[in-house]
Amino acid sequence: MVIRQLRSEEFDASMNLSEYAFQYKLPSEKRASAKERFKAEQVWGAFEDGTLEAKLTIIPFQVYIQGRVVPMGGIAGVATWPENRRQGHVANLLSHALHTMNEAGQMLSFLHPFLIPFYRKFGWEVYCEYKKYSIPVAKFPKKVEVEGKVRRDIKDIEVLDSLYNRFAVRYNGTLKRDLDWWENSVLDDEGKSAVFYSKSGEPEGYVLYKVENRELVIDEFVFLNEQARQGLWTFLANHDSMVTGASLKLVPSDDILPFLLPDPRIGQENYPYFMGRIVNAKSFIETYAFRGNSSQKKQLIYIEDKYAPWNDGLWAWNISNEGSATLIRVEGERAEADLRCDIGTLTALMLGYKRPTEMARYGSVSGHAAALEWFEEIIPQAQTALFDHF
């Protein structure tokens, strides 16, 4: 088996595999457009005798972590022909992808799993979830008079992106979008938009939505303050003669809209979403801002990482009074460590999706009581989210 990047003339082989694996068929005009946008260098394939048997795509992204931008490799389009399954092709591709992302300096990797247990084996772990709401018209938020106005059909990406960034930076794991992503993955011809402007004319929030089958389908709801939230909801509620209700998806897990409704008994669902993985533990930890001034400055941690051997092993983890860290590999066995966890658990902890004490309670982290207390103390509280899909 040979693993290599695809060539531009292999678009049809790649698309044929995607269509079969994901059970869809692109119309000829969309296929032609996809061919123009095909980035062969991002697609890695497993070949036998020159035939493409499995593939995946590594998309270079940037994501917000603690308010700063971190390079991330997005894994997408993992596919194999049914006759080639369970032959190790995808495992080999994922292992190769980790080496490729590490060499490219992508400290993190995210993916949307078709099966969570499958990717957990390779070190990816759930790092975020979203809420989904279904709200009948009778339970819409109250219409409120606010100072400011809503303008429809605002597709000015500069305005939308500025608002998005100020909202997304509050969370760990959100994408730093570029122009191409906005044009081809966020906005579409069928979607509608509305922006809330304050009395002074400043944009303070937006909503991306559709009206389908007498339902408001709200794809993205971004607000910087309560006035913007109320103004946008009043705009949406004024569709009450046109629709029977609204559905919202990809709502951040810390959202409290139901509590703010006149009647919070609406359809609600929490859904585990994307998985994340630290690609290079040393680089990621040494660029992370920890809580300083801990009584303990150093602990030994054993990181288990079968598929990224540069992470696997015993490390001396030092934290300065200012919260900067060093992670230095040391000789020693697992039993010598003060703390022990696998790379997936470490990812969930470092991104803020779970807490060390919580994970220790269920056996995902082990160690001495003092070391576990240190672990809990140094990692800041955070919320995770993702408003995109790839």
Image (cartoon, rainbow, N blue to C red):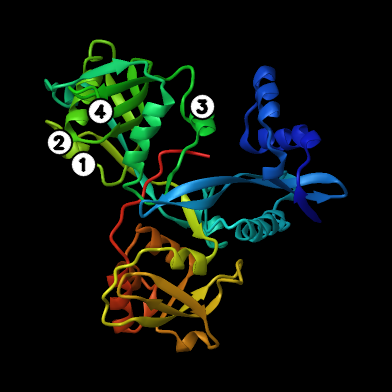
Amino acid type at circle 1 is Ile
Q: Is mark 1 on a helix, strand or loop?
A: loop
**Disc 2 target residue:** 260
Earlier-in-chain disc, 3 versus 2 = 3
- Residue at the image position 41 percent from the left and 20 percent from the top: 155
Please identify the quarter of the rendering in which residue 43 is found: top right
Amino acid type at circle 3 is Glu
Front of the two marks 3 and 4: 3
Amino acid type at circle 4 is Ile
Neighbours of disc 3 within 10 Å: few (<14), some (14-19), many (20+): few
Earlier-in-chain disc, 4 versus 1 = 4
**Disc 1 target residue:** 256
Compute the Cα span from label 3 to label 1. 30 Å
- Residue at the image position 30 percent from the left and 75 percent from the top: 321
Earlier-in-chain disc, 2 versus 4 = 4
**Disc 4 target residue:** 135
Q: Are marks 2 and 1 in contact (CB under 8 Å)?
A: yes
Q: Quick check: can you spot residue 188?
A: yes
Q: What element carries label 4?
A: strand
Compute the Cα span from label 2 to label 1. 7 Å
On screen, residue 263 versus residue 107, left or right, reads left
- Could you say which is closer to the camera, residue 38 or residue 12? 38
**Disc 3 target residue:** 183
